[in-house]
Image: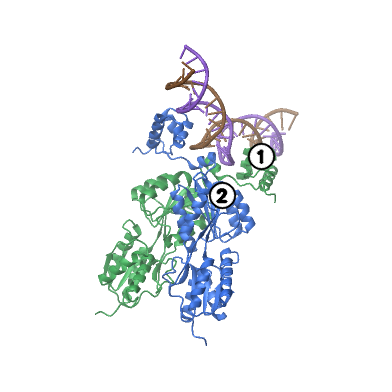
Chain colours: A green, B blue, C brown, D purple
Amino acid sequence: MAMQAAGTDRPATIHDIAAICGVAASTVSRALSTPDRVNIRTRARIEAAAAELNYTPNSQAKALSSGRTGAVGVLVPDITNPFYFDLIRGTQLQLKAAGYTQLLVDTEESDEVEASTMEQLRKSADGIIVAASRLSDEALLAAAARIPMVTINRDVAGVPAVVIDTPSATSQALDHLISLGHTRIAYMAGPLTSQSSTLRWTALAAAAEDRGVDVRRLGPFAPKTQSGAAAADAAVHSGVTACIAFNDLIAIGMLQRLRERGIRVPEDISVVGCDDIFGADFCNPPLTTMTSPIEQAGRVAVSMLLAQLNPLAGGGSRSRSLMPTHLTVRGSTGAAPAAL
Amino acid sequence: MAMQAAGTDRPATIHDIAAICGVAASTVSRALSTPDRVNIRTRARIEAAAAELNYTPNSQAKALSSGRTGAVGVLVPDITNPFYFDLIRGTQLQLKAAGYTQLLVDTEESDEVEASTMEQLRKSADGIIVAASRLSDEALLAAAARIPMVTINRDVAGVPAVVIDTPSATSQALDHLISLGHTRIAYMAGPLTSQSSTLRWTALAAAAEDRGVDVRRLGPFAPKTQSGAAAADAAVHSGVTACIAFNDLIAIGMLQRLRERGIRVPEDISVVGCDDIFGADFCNPPLTTMTSPIEQAGRVAVSMLLAQLNPLAGGGSRSRSLMPTHLTVRGSTGAAPAAL
DNA sequence: AATCATTTGGCAATCGGTTGTCATTGACAG
DNA sequence: CTGTCAATGACAACCGATTGCCAAATGATT
């Protein structure tokens, strides 16, 4: 009701409450954090005063004295990649639900920025979530020893991770293409530093060998729609009838380029993406892609991190979580063109 | 070179440096922040020790004692809306360049969440950037009195603002449609609480009156692709031959729905979006839309806020910045169908 | 009624810095 | 040789909480 303690405009402190109630500041602190350690009547008075003054604890001070900051850092390589939008949304939701603040940082695909950010965050965050880390295994492991960490799409022994199981979906995609009659297929690789890209290629190559079809690797290509042009040209030049792109951005870029060049999709060439990001369903043609539970992955990562921070809450914290993926067939894949 | 002070693993403090150099902690603080107040030789020793210990100041402690947090809050109504991706990217880049940290918060289109977040941020941020605020003018003004603020797409007297000039672009869009022969046009409105939507409608209605064409307002519709279905149906039912959507999300959703219903775009109906978000160029058909310099708006907002925080740097801080917009014509608009 | 166990709540140190105040130092001028 | 002044750096208070420790108060027990 009352806006503020009359006159003063600065936020109320624990001392203001203490003065009003005639108790020590420490008592107020206890009443607010460990209610059982304080007489129920004084507690009531304190709570009333706190409400009256519209008191909210100063998080800086809290962090300084308690060591806990109530913040979690979220590191993504490129904030403009729609893939991370969903991820960020997932972490944001789950963190907010748990009363944490999200510190979002774009590491600009740079291992240096990533490392220095981690060191920085060591003091200003209780833990960090690192998506698609560009760091070496050793560096990542070393960092994880210094601050609670959960990685996403980066599996290193000893570091809790959430892994979206796209590799296994690649064989599903491959079978889909084979069933449509394709036998010459390309994988449009992502950045060399991306473990996801490597794992997808490994899984795809293994599946291809198993099925006895020809799958070649092209690239690497940057995970942006602009790279799609180069990817499209490379695919066409290589003579394949279908390709599986590292992610939807590349795939969508390919779609645009192919259209410009008058190459029909899927009649002349089929394109499969990966992730099912915003836009995959309304591009032209709609993209067949491996749908990832991205937002959910973000939420799970937060849960794992919080479990690590507060070991009290029963549930034995799992150190690795594999998120299932499935193929979503849309319009960008079709029967292989008749052989010349 | 040396990893850490041998043995101790916790971050080095100003006191560690002081002990090594045999000076008081305050001297170290001064040497690091106001170098001229300290002997150049001791300063050198201190800097050497700091480097040796790999010292980085504790931001919490710094914030507590100095009152400045080095963080800026960025409030957006819906983090999943691609429009805000570009905005967030712009703020992130500019903040990082200035050495600030970005605190990203999704206010979930709720004025309550927005207000409480602001109160919260009052202590943990030096200033805030509020995009498309859902707050009343009074509430916004009151909040701005409590913490340095810059709004984006929300113009309230007394609060510095960055405004993307989409209203004036609406008349450009209208003229484009008129030149194609359209005379019955609909505006697919956004949320009632969105000032942008209101301003666009006002500008559009005025322009329509001026040109003597019929423009009716339909909606409101939530700014999501899913709302596009309802919007599309409403537009078709109203018998218009063209429509201007509040934003690209609605427009893209309409495109999808119209396609499902077998209504051709632009042959049967033309659609104009607003913002030119990710996806507007590759949807089907590519969307004619009002292109906004979104990322730039984010950067400008940060600059204005920082100018407000550090009045020292000459440039008289402008209190209002109007970002120009232009119409980008793509495939979703075409000649009006012949009258029945 | 005296003793002991248990609450209850205050004191003061602490977190890691910043900053006002002041004593010391040395240089220089008178 | 001494007085003035600027430069330097140490001391200590402070920012707003948390938390260990202890004394006082309460209540239960015998």
Residue drawn 34% across the image and 73% down it? A260
Judging depth in this view, the residue of B136 and B24 nearest the camera is B136
Q: Position of residue A262 (x, y in %)?
A: 32, 76
Local SS, label 2:
loop
Q: Position of residue B150 (x, y in %)?
A: 54, 54
In this image, A261 relative to B74: left or right?
Answer: left
Q: In front of the other: label 1 or label 2? A: 2
> To which chain does the residue with label 1 belong?
A
Q: Quadrant of the C terminus of chain A?
A: bottom left
**Furthest residue in direction bottom, as rendered:** B340
Res. B25 mark: none
Judging depth in this view, the residue of A81 and A25 nearest the camera is A81
Residue position marked by numbered label 1 in the rendering: A18
In this image, A268 relative to D30: left or right?
Answer: left
Amino acid type for the residue under numbered disc 1: Ala
Local SS, label 1:
helix
Residue drawn 44% across the image and 34% down it? B35
Determine the CA span between mark 1 and mark 2. Answer: 29 Å
Residue position marked by numbered label 2 in the rendering: B148
| Other-residue count near label 2 (Cα within 10 Å), few / some / many at <14 / 14–19 / ≥20 | many
- Give residue A186's quadrant in the image: bottom left
Judging depth in this view, the residue of D10 and A333 nearest the camera is D10
Amino acid type for the residue under numbered disc 2: Pro
Q: Position of residue A102 (x, y in %)?
A: 50, 52
Residue drawn 49% across the image and 59% down it? A89
The answer to whether residue A26 of the structure is visible from this angle is yes
Q: Position of residue B216 (x, y in %)?
A: 58, 75
